[in-house]
Amino acid sequence: GDSEGDSGGETYTVATDNNFVPFEFMNEETGEMEGFDIDLIKAIADEAGFNIEIESMKFDGVVAGMQSGRYDIGIAGMTITEERKETIDFSDPYYDAGLMLAVSADNDEIQSEDDLAGKKVGTRSGTTSETYIRENHPDAELITFPGIVEAYMDLESGRLDAVMYDVPNVQYYVANDSEGLKTAGDILQGEQYGIAFPKDSELVSDVNEALQTLIDNGTYDDIYEEWFGE
Ligand code: GLN
């Protein structure tokens, strides 16, 4: 991992997802992780007076790493769920998200989640979308991938009929990284992202305090604007 900043304080390890645009992804030119979550956790570390070392991995590795206490902090567009709260602590919510479908731009058959029966629907394993499809669409053919980009690529090549994933990721990917895809239907499930910690971490309150300061002093809005343009 790469060390960020030097405030003279403690250094904590931060686990992040290796590819979840625009929250965290590898900038191939610089070889560094960047994105909304990366800027946010750097600003939180500066504000709270600690150093961070960022390590990127598959999303399910972030969840497991928090449960085992292998990393001090996890930031990965991780949805706060009752189930995860049994084994992981979360900060206050820092981003409102939800789930959405992507389909091929010329697909008029799938207009909403009501049209998924018998269709090949891809998503990423260990995520809220996987749970949502299992619980709400047992008649769809669910196909899971370790990385969401692999699912989008199979959608582009016609091996899948739809992909379900987080709204900001679907919208960003459709607008910037793909050709021939569109979103379909409405937001399916309201979700909120939280920064993750091993259970009973003493860092939770420091991070919440720093997060609130960044919201109050406009830093959060500056970071939001940089990645979401509003
Ligand atoms: N928000 C989703 C979840 O928590 C997936 C996040 C991601 O792929 N990084 O399950």
Image: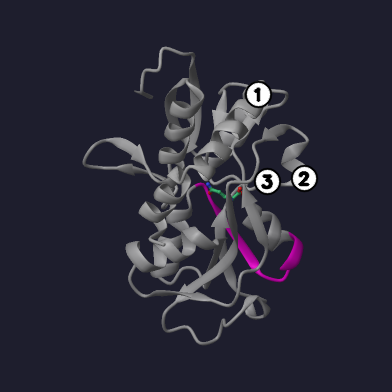
Image quarter in which the N terminus is found: top left
Q: Where is residue 158, by image quadrant?
A: bottom left
Q: Which mark is residue 156?
A: none
Q: Amino acid at mark 2?
A: Glu
Q: Quadrant of residue 85?
A: top right
Q: Closer to the observer: label 1 or label 2?
A: 2
Give the CA distance from mark 2 to mark 3: 7 Å
Query: Could you give the CA–CA distance between mark 3 and mark 1, rounded to whole angstroms?
Result: 18 Å
- Residue drawn 58% across and 21% down? 70
Q: Nearer the viewer, mark 3 or mark 1?
A: 3
Q: Nearer the viewer, residue 167 or 65?
A: 167
Identity of the residue drawn at 47% across and 20% down:
50
Give the residue drawn at x 35%, y 38%. Answer: 33
**Mark 2 lies on residue:** 82
* Mark 2 element type: helix
Query: Considering depth in this image, is 120 or 87 the residue closer to the camera?
Result: 87
Residues marked 3 and 1 touching at CB (< 8 Å): no
In this rendering, the answer to whether 139 lies above or below 143 is: below
Taking the magenta stretch, the answer to whether it contains residue 136 is: yes
Residue bearing mark 3: 80
Considering only order in the chain, which callout, 1 or 3, is on the residue closer to the N terminus?
1
195 in magenta: no
Q: Give, as a single range, the part of the protein colored magenta.
A: 135-146
SS at circle 1: helix
| Image coords of residue 99 (percent x, y) | 60, 63
For the question of whether residue 163 can be seen, the reply is yes
Amino acid at dot 1 = Ser
Q: Is residue 127 visible?
A: no
